[in-house]
Amino acid sequence: MQHLLSLHDLTVEEVKNLLLLAKKLKSEQKKGLAHPLLKGKTLGMIFSKSSTRTRVSFEVGMVQLGGHPLFLSSNDIQLGRGETIYDTAKVLSRYIDGIMIRTFKQSDIEDLATYGSIPVINGLTDLLHPCQILADLLTVHEYKSKLEGLKMAYVGDGNNIAHSLLYGCAKVGMDIAVATPKGYGCDAEIIEKAKDDARLTGCSITITDDPVEAVKGADAVYTDTWVSMGQEKEKEERVKMFKPYQVNKELLAFAKQDAIFLHCLPAYRGFEVTEDIIDGPQSAIFDEAENRLHAQKAVMAQLLGSQK
Ligand code: CP
Ligand code: NVA
């Protein structure tokens, strides 16, 4: 494992090992045991979009691993003024040990990895959000003590979260059903690639426009905002289109009785999810948010720690 650009690039073994390491680091941290695995290492964190969880959990995670995080807003570095990805990758590789980047185009992250000589971690693009899904899988495992054989339902926009969730569930052998309105579905190539992995791990992938079909018998029900970063102008139309896809009491009733509710956050109560669900007893959202820290520490330890 050289980078974390997409969960699809990882082997089943690599995903499972990351989750195991995340669990170990979490339990050590809870016991107050230090684990300075990245002493003397520096992580550059480039942000071209807003963030609360990703920024704070990477920054704190790096400190807990004994390393140094460097926040690099694209408004402040020359990348935001048109310096190329090529030059940025080459230059940063001379100073730091790894890059976490949140930006728009997946191809920019791939270029950064290609041209640089240090590990690159995808902190969200328009297409994917792999770190989030590692934290989600960790959360489901904590609640259900397994992943294989469970059913994940995702209802809403066929966006970066839906894409990485398809990849993540397929890797760990968890059935996944995705319900999106017509015209807002997942990328066809991503669905096919996830299906390849699902064949290997023996799980199923269901793509539908019927939220009830997706949620029926699910162990976890996941939704995300209907208006992702960069889509603000489409808000009015999206709210209209996605209304039947709201996760509410009526929809959640089709899931297993002990199903958990997941949301990557930030959430918009009254839109993609009702208040009674997101703030109710089935909601696991704050464990999920906390697990960003533990999952990403595992990713950083794996990628930056093994560097000579
Ligand atoms: N879930 C997530 O990535 O949150 P932020 O946008 O706050 O980083
Ligand atoms: N789909 C959302 C996820 C935010 C963490 C977005 O891209 O804005």
Image (cartoon, helix red, strand yellow):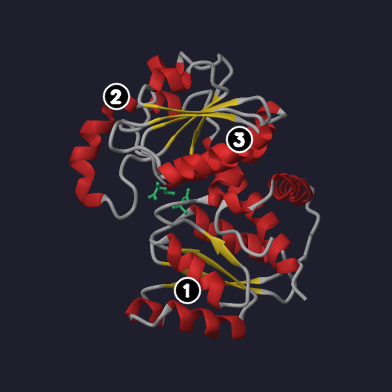
What crowding class fits label 2: few (fewer than 14 Cα within 10 Å), some (14-19), or many (20 or more)? some
Q: Specify the amino acid type for callout 2.
A: Pro
Placement of 64 over or under 134, stated as above or below:
below
Q: Which residue is mark 2?
A: 244
The reply to whether residue 2 is in sight is yes
Residue 98 drawn at (x, y percent): 62, 71
Circle 1 — which element? strand
Q: Are marks 1 and 2 in contact (CB under 8 Å)?
A: no
**Nearer the camera: disc 2 or disc 3:** 3
Asked if ligand 2 lies within 8 A of label 3, the reply is: no
Q: Which residue is mark 1?
A: 72
Placement of 19 over or under 145, stated as above or below:
below
The quadrant the C terminus occupies is bottom right
Circle 3 — which element? helix
Q: Give the image quarter of residue 68.
A: bottom right
130 displayed left or right of 14 = left
Q: Residue at x 69, y 64 (%)?
A: 303
Q: Give the image quarter of residue 60.
A: bottom right
The count of marks equals 3
**Nearer the camera: disc 1 or disc 2:** 2
Residue 11 drawn at (x, y percent): 69, 49
Disc number for residue 198:
3
